[in-house]
Amino acid sequence: MIFSEERAMTDSKKKKNSLYRSDYGEAVLSAGNGSPGEIRIATTALASVIRHAACSVDGVSRIAGNSLVDNIAEFVGSRKVLDRAIQIKIDGDSIEVVIAINIQYGFSLPEIAGNVQEAVVQQIREFTGLQAARVDVIIREMELPGEEDEE
């Protein structure tokens, strides 16, 4: 791939920040002085960390699809539905996340959402060293016991 001088200048400006989003859906971290290169984390890898963090919270039944097509895609094993349910924005040195979940009936919605936010922030920091500036949680549905098995 050939980079233009303008692109090279833009990339060098971006590297002054500790984190930026590349044109390829990656978080790019400046590895620091003396490093032989940079570290790139694909947003799909970040989505996996976020998905695992959210699903580890007691009361979360699953990541939520928002349409019939998403539900069919999930049934046949497509991970695209999961990626659509998790949105990641990389801006400067921060990450913003929006995640849609379904929870089990009988749990406190604000408590579950708060626990998901804490788990996502903690696991992003633990697994990537990055900071999540904002984590928005959308609760799509409350599922009755056994309901997730029927779909």
Image (cartoon, rainbow, N blue to C red):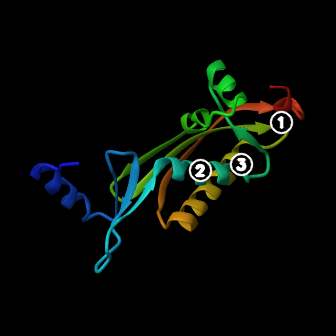
Q: CA distance from mark 3 to mark 2?
A: 11 Å
**Is residue 138 found left or right of 43 in the rendered image?**
right
Please say whether residue 26 is visible from this viewpoint. Answer: yes
Classify mark 3: residues with Cα within 10 Å, few (<14), some (14-19) or many (20+).
some
Q: Is residue 48 above or below residue 140?
A: below
Residue farthest toward the front in the current orientation of the protein? 1
**Element at badge 2?**
helix
Residues tagged 1 and 2 counted as in contact (Cβ below 8 A): no
Q: CA distance from mark 3 to mark 1?
A: 15 Å
**Front in this rendered view, residue 119 or 33:** 33
Say which residue label 1 marks: 105
Instruction: Name which residue type carries label 3.
Output: Cys
**Is residue 46 found left or right of 64 in the rendered image?**
left
Indicate which disc residue 48 carries: 2
Q: x%, y% of residue 74? A: 68, 31
**Element at badge 1?**
loop
Instruction: Name which residue type carries label 1.
Output: Tyr
Q: x%, y% of residue 64? A: 66, 34
Q: Residue at x 40, y 51 (%)?
A: 26
Mark with earlier residue (3, 2): 2
